[in-house]
Image (spheres, helix red, strand yellow):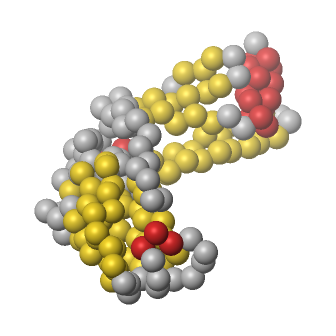
């Protein structure tokens, strides 16, 4: 754990699945107590890449994508694809096996362009990666995560209490 001016950070290097869980930072002094928490899910795949609408027709759409570049020690156990109607209404969800990177989504109401599509990968351990969104044009996912995770708490109250505690200890 490191502390600089008004930020306290916990960096976990060489993250493993055993590091997954709830992390909590708490601080107290004679003026009070506060805490902050964060959930960490290790072993999740990264973003799927290059979602493409490769076919569509009356009530269906065909999507394909490239698998994540980074698996972070995870083996891909499958994918989940959703078609979300842009003007509200039904959402269609399809689960796809680990070797498949193409899916046909049936049961769409109207034009396939009236939907936003998203895809995420799942590890064999059941941990979901983040969604990659396709909204009629290619949306580049954020840069892949690094294997060391950084949890940062920036709550103003926590910072004030930390500084007060430091002053009181001196």
Depth check: give the residue in front, 83 or 70: 83
Q: Is residue 113 above or below residue 3?
A: below
Q: Is residue 51 left or right of residue 114?
A: left
- Residue at point 74% right, 30% down? 159
The residue sitting at 74% across, 20% down in the picture is 166
Residue 51 appears at what percent x and percent y? Answer: 33, 55
Query: Is residue 33 toward the left or the right of residue 23 in the image?
Result: right
**Residue closer to the observer: 28 or 152:** 152
Coordinates of residue 140 in the picture (x, y in percent): 41, 43
Image height of 73 relative to 88, above or below: above
Q: Indicate left or right for 157 with 64 as reference.
A: right
Number of numbered discs overlaid on the protein picture:
0
Q: Quadrant of residue 170?
A: top right
Image coordinates of residue 84 in percent, x first then y, are 49, 72
- The residue sitting at 38% across, 77% down in the picture is 93
The residue furthest left is 99
Which residue occupies 54% across, 21% down? 2
Q: Residue furthest right?
A: 31
Residue 50 point in image, percent of width and height: 31, 49
Q: Is residue 125 visible?
A: no
Question: In the figure, is residue 2 to the left or right of 35?
Answer: left
Above or below 60: residue 164: above
Question: Which residue is nearer to you in this view: 145 or 110?
Answer: 110
Q: Is residue 60 visible?
A: yes
Q: Residue placed farthest to the top in the image?
A: 170
- In this view, the residue in front, 32 or 1, is 1
Q: Quadrant of residue 59?
A: bottom left
């Amino acid at each position: 754990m490191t502390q600089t001016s008004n930020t306290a950070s916990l960096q976990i290097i060489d993250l493993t699945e055993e590091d997954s869980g709830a992390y909590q930072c708490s601080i107290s002094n004679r003026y009070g107590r506060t805490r902050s928490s964060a959930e960490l899910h290790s072993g999740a795949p990264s973003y799927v890449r290059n979602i493409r609408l490769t076919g569509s027709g009356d009530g269906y759409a065909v999507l394909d994508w490239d698998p994540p570049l980074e698996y972070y020690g995870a083996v891909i156990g499958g994918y989940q694809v959703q078609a979300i109607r842009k003007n509200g209404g039904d959402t269609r969800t399809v689960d796809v096996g680990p070797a498949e990177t193409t899916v046909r989504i049936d049961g769409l109401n109207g034009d396939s362009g009236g939907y936003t599509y998203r895809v995420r990968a799942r590890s064999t351990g059941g941990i979901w990666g983040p969604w990659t969104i396709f909204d009629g044009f290619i949306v580049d996912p954020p840069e892949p995560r690094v294997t060391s995770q950084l949890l940062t708490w920036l709550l103003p109250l926590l910072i004030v209490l930390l500084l007060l505690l430091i002053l009181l200890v001196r």
